[in-house]
Image (cartoon, helix red, strand yellow):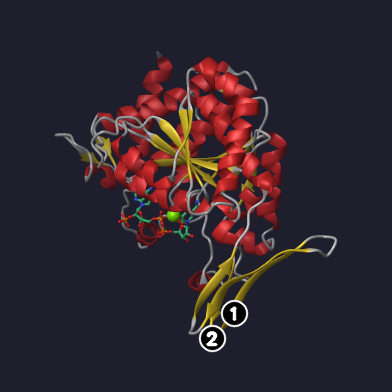
Amino acid sequence: MAKIQMKTPLVEMDGDEMTRIIWSMLKEHLILPFVDLKTEYYDLGLVKRDETDDQITIDAANACKKYGVGVKCATITPNAQRMTEYNLKKMWKSPNGTIRAILDGTVFRAPITMDCLKPSVRSWNKPITIARHAYGDIYKNTEFRVPGAGKAEIKFTDEAGNVLCDETVFDFKCPGVFMGMYNKDDSIESFARACFQYAIATKQDLWFSTKDTISKKYDHTFKDIFQRIFDEEYKAKFDELGITYFYTLIDDAVARVIRSNGGFIWALKNYDGDVMSDMVATAFGSLAMMTSVLVSPDGNYEYEAAHGTVTKHYYKHLAGETTSTNSMATIFAWSGALRKRGELDELPELVHFANMLEKASLDTIASGHMTKDLALLADMEDKHIETTEGFILKIKENLEKLLAC
Ligand code: NAP
Ligand code: MG
């Protein structure tokens, strides 16, 4: 069989621990035998990040901007324990945070759903995609532990030196806490556009929710910006496709999401998205089945699995034990990136390959071959627990059959 040719390279970002092992296995068995793979390779493994003073992460993010499509392996975000484990020069920042800041993107997370994996919420028969604003708010806050009586104040001085806001937040008579946080109109506008564009691209309704009744300036600004951009730029296209944009208070949204059948995008502010995406992932079954894509307002796409480097499995692997780590989300990161590359470069064979790779993976699970995490969840009689590599090899068998047709 002739290998599928590519035109433009993909930005390939390698990572750490168990997912790094999966990365090389799935390239070897599922991609390289079928595709004449063109990538620009960046090793975002912690060792290389430390060696390059994290410059490699910045270079990789800029390459994503240059080529438009990237695929990333999970990476370690160092903490105190990793400083010792890897003898690091510095506690480097989260690579995902660095890449997001450079691409100014919105993260969309969607579960891979299957009939044999029943969501905890019985009515959900289609995936729910969470769109999380990945900028500002509590993640860039300034906070203070108040030691005792005193006044907490908030102040804004414009460029010309005029004080436009000078208010008492609270007059403390005892110890407590207080914080300040911010966001920017242009970041909220990018977030809104990314959501509307993603809704159009995937032909799904878009929901957005904040706490605007309580936060009449901060959250209300998000609501107003979304509405203005929708009316001015996207309403006509939504009408044409028969999809809707719907804003509601976050409390109401939570109740509606639980009663829904799924099949829509739920846009959320940074903190709400962080928390709700974990809730939705768990309710759909497994973090190992959650995909993630970062979409920038100027149309760059970075695909990855939502889970981490699966450290516990990696230590077992190092100890010579067999592992049964689920590679589905990492495979779907590759198929997502290859499909997008194929669409942008007008390569229908590459798009077809990406679709068949996903189908082969789903067929493998549907035929009862799965990793341990799914065996615990799948509603099916005949289940075979595969090793990490065994599962990938089963997918390869199915993929070869599909491509031969
Ligand atoms: P994790 O790697 O997502 O794993 C947490 C647990 O979830 C695992 O121990 C495993 O449970 C289960 N799990 C996750 N993915 C799985 C898979 N593919 N197959 C089977 N089971 C899976 O989270 P973590 O242990 O908290 O974090 C480990 C490292 O990943 C940290 O250094 C963190 O910084 C990094 N991280 C990176 C990213 C990213 O790059 N996007 C995201 C999150 C975390 P059992 O042990 O019960 O089998
Ligand atoms: Mg979270």
> Quadrant location of residue 40?
top right
The disc at residue 149 is 2
Residue labelled with disc 1: 151
Q: Position of residue 153 (x, y in %)?
A: 63, 73
Beta carbon at label 1 within 8 Å of ligand 2: no
Left or right relative to 183: residue 353: left
- Other residues around mark 2 within 10 Å, as few (<14) / some (14–19) / many (≥20): few
Q: Is residue 285 visible?
A: no
On screen, residue 131 above or below 143:
above
Give the structural element (helix, strand or loop) at label 1: strand
Q: Secondary structure at mark 2?
A: loop
- Ligand 1 image position (quadrant): bottom left
Q: Nearer the viewer, residue 64 or 138?
A: 138
Amino acid at pointer 2 = Ala
Going 56% across and 60% down the picture, which residue do you hit?
139
- For this orientation, the residue located farthest to the right is 160
Q: Are marks 2 and 1 in contact (CB under 8 Å)?
A: no
Which of the numbered marks, if any, corresponds to residue 388?
A: none
Seen from the viewer's position, the closer of residues 108 and 33 is: 108
The type of residue carrying mark 1 is Lys
Left or right: 151, with 27 as reference point = right
Would you place residue 196 above or below residue 98 in this image? above
Q: Quadrant of the C terminus?
A: top left
